[in-house]
Amino acid sequence: MNVVSPEGPLLSGIHIMVVEDDDVINELLTDLLVLEGAEVTTAGSGNQARALLATVRPQLIISDVMMPDGDGHELLRSLQADPMFDGVPFIFLTARSEPADQRRGMNLGADDYLVKPVARQDLLDAVRARLRRSQVAGFCQRELDAQLRDENARRMPAQLIAPLHTIRGAAEIQLMDAALDRGNRELAEMIISATDRMARSVKRFWRLTELHATLRRAAAEKPARPVGDSGTSRARLAEGAEAIAAEAARLADFSATLHPVPFPMEENDLLLLTRELLDNAFRYSPPGSPVHLATHLENGRWTLSVIDRGHDLAPAEVESMHRWLQGFPDASSREPQGMGLALVDSLARAHGFLVKFASAQPTGLKVTVSQTVR
């Protein structure tokens, strides 16, 4: 194998494999492509090429047809059977110019068929044309995959939640039986609690996926537009936050200082963001310690913060939380246990806010969601 990769103007950064048993032609093709900036991997036969392709993945393959140790047709068929090489352009280069030979190569699925001796410009034109077509096809496929993923994500919650309603209903019917013993009553209550948690998790994941699609579209339409701009009243936010604290059996620990003017975020999204922040605060702070929710308006920009008095965080821990959010811009790639923070981050960005973490004094964590655009 020979790999070379100097800088060049036309094919810079493109990895091409040349499969040719004639050493002179192999070297000429390699030199020509290298001068145009390509990285070239060479093989002397189809079998050698297959061995090399176990460890390298070129963006285009140029192959001779007639070779003693595995010909080009066999190589092409083997690549077509491997999903890893789906969409990689394949160009035949051969001394046989009969129409029947060309039809055979194209019928096998080759992208182009060049006859030796091939002119430099003809080869470069064919390479660039196939690379452009491959890039367009790849972009279209990625867009289609994203659309299908978004559509499936929209349908999935109802399919998952419907059985949970059935399970919850059956447990509620059991609880209506006055003769139900204590053990089975506790079991039915556990089932109801578990189905409620599962339903919330499904809805969180659905909203996270929906937000990811919104943010992806917004990135292509600059400037990005918030997904909602209706404000949420102080009373509604206070009511929702108190209900979350009551669910966690931490109502006595909870307090709030809320600005009287409506918070500039669509109500369902603000309540969901607040739920995730308060759930996190209640989970990582001991019962009996305070958790405080606040909103305020400063210099025309809104801020929401949640402060808990859990364990003290070192600066390195706080920084690692920021790096975690920055390292996973694609919501679908986040780990399940981090879905709550991922949802907070996605909700904030969709509405033009930024999430920041800081150590609270004397102990605990302060999470701030601050408006960056109006």
Image: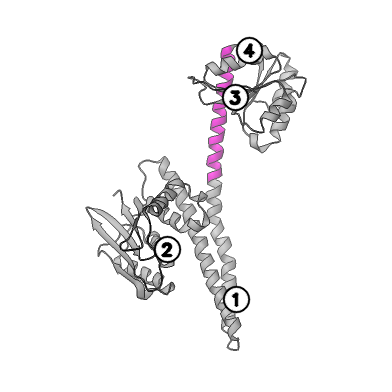
Comparing labels 1 and 2, the label whose residue is closer to the camera:
2
Q: Residue 288, located in which quarter of the rendered image?
A: bottom left
Q: Tell me which numbered mark, 3 or 2, is placed earlier along the sequence.
A: 3
Q: Tell me which numbered mark, 4 or 3, is placed earlier along the sequence.
A: 3
Describe residue 26's horizontal placement relative to residue 342 as left or right. Answer: right
Q: Residues within 10 Å of mark 1 (few under 14, many from 20)?
A: some
Q: Position of residue 280 (x, y in %)?
A: 42, 63
Q: Tell me which numbered mark, 4 or 2, is placed earlier along the sequence.
A: 4
Region rendered in magenta: 120-146
Of residues 40 and 147, which is closer to you in this image?
Answer: 40
Disc number at residue 118?
4
How far apart in space, not on screen, are marks 3 and 2 (Cα)?
Answer: 50 Å
Describe residue 136's horizontal placement relative to residue 18 as left or right. Answer: left
Q: Is residue 121 magenta?
A: yes
| Circle 2: residue type | Asn
What residue is shown with label 1?
Answer: 170
What residue is shown with label 3?
Answer: 16
Q: Position of residue 131 (x, y in %)?
A: 56, 26
What residue is shown with label 2?
Answer: 280
Looking at the image, do the residues carrying marks 3 and 1 touch, with CB atoms under 8 Å apart? no
Q: Tell me which numbered mark, 1 or 2, is placed earlier along the sequence.
A: 1
Q: In terms of secondary structure, where does tag 2 sit? A: helix
Q: Is residue 13 above or below residue 125?
A: below
